[in-house]
Image: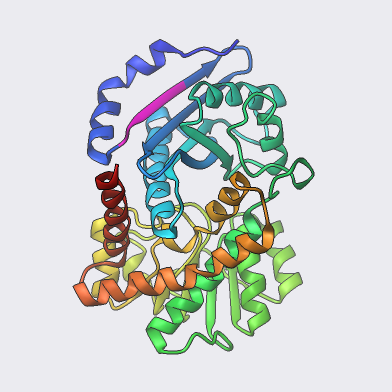
Amino acid sequence: MVEIDVNSKLSVQAGVLEQMDNMGHEQVVFCRDRKTGLRAIIAVHNTVLGPSLGGCRMWNYQSEAEALKDVLRLSRGMTYKSAVAGLDLGGGKAVIIGDPKKDKTDDLMRAFGSFVDSLGGKYITAEDVGMQTRDMSIIKETTRYVTGIAEELGGGGNPSPVTGFGVYKGIKASAKFKWGNDNLKNRSVVVQGIGNVGETVVKHLTDEGATVYINDISPQRMKQVSEEYGAAIVSNDELYSMNVDIYAPCALGATLNDETIPQLNCSVVAGAANNQLADENKHGKMLMERGIVYAPDFVINAGGIINVYDELIGYNRERAMEKTENIYNSVLRVLEISREKKIPAGQAAIELAERRIKEAELKN
């Protein structure tokens, strides 16, 4: 039987409530199951447009505070992502504290599913970093509020190919905005992070004839992807200062910060990673001041949420891909608003999302 660890919740309660006020969250749930060792946090940011849907990330966080910060930022991003994408969904996210390679068990997944189920559909979970399609199928044993399940069970399977395709379309839109032409042939792109999504981006770029460079924390992974697609491997030391057309961050967030932005020698930043800006206001302005086009992460990486949303209405891969193609138009729209209003692209995207949410609130 799963249970709330009250002592864990109380130890950070004051900080949680303050952060919830600052970021506009509706609910944060701390989950603890002693039998399986589960330690998780579920954050529901906004449910005005519909139930909150967002992936569950399993990561070996160094502290509860680090995990909380991540889940709060990610869940808010999901609200904006779904709103800009035109989906009838709110924003939510979950994080499981632990090493997915060592700590993940089927029983732990079932325990997490029980917590999700206890929210009665206010939060619907899905796959994220450290999780796999198989995990979603196990979670489904204890809750129906899960998407991204295996195709043989009626789901859409791994959403990474759709996410990667959407990022590729967003890169093309960013190129169109910057250069007046979205042809990526002979454009140079460095892709940081070549997991399932990053590799899909590499494939599409390579197929179009772009010159692709790759970087990842795994030497084995870099070797594999380099050999398959002919992409050149880039070291950490030269990653940010490379003279390329496009930098595509597709790993974890906060790679755009005080240290890296001055090093950038690119014209466009467009990638799949969530929360790419360490400080969304400060670093969004820094990119704009440097004349670097930035495709907001929660706009360009919406393919995954579009894909799992389609499961809720009866999954159809072709329909999901068609909706994902519209990311091209969404990115262009945000960049045009940014230029017209002379505000950072991230701010323009947030304003667009909040406008849709406010319109829904007025109707209700």
Seen from the viewer's position, the closer of residues 283 and 31 is 31
Residue 58 in sight from this viewpoint: no
Residue at (30%, 60%) from the top-left corner? 352
Q: Residue 92 in the image: x percent, y percent?
A: 44, 39
Seen from the viewer's position, the closer of residues 85 and 95 is 85
Is residue 29 highlighted in magenta?
A: yes
Q: Quarter-wise, where is residue 5 in the image?
A: top left
**Part of the protein shown in magenta:** 25-30
Q: Mostly what secondary structure, the magenta segment?
A: strand
Q: Quadrant of the N terminus?
A: top right
Q: Residue 88 in the image: x percent, y percent?
A: 45, 49
In the depicted structure, whether residue 343 falls above or below residue 257: below
In the depicted structure, whether residue 182 falls above or below residue 261: below
Residue at (38%, 63%) from the top-left corner? 296
Is residue 14 highlighted in magenta?
A: no
In the depicted structure, whether residue 360 falls above or below residue 2: below
Q: Quadrant of the C terminus?
A: top left
Q: Residue 354 in the image: x percent, y percent?
A: 28, 53
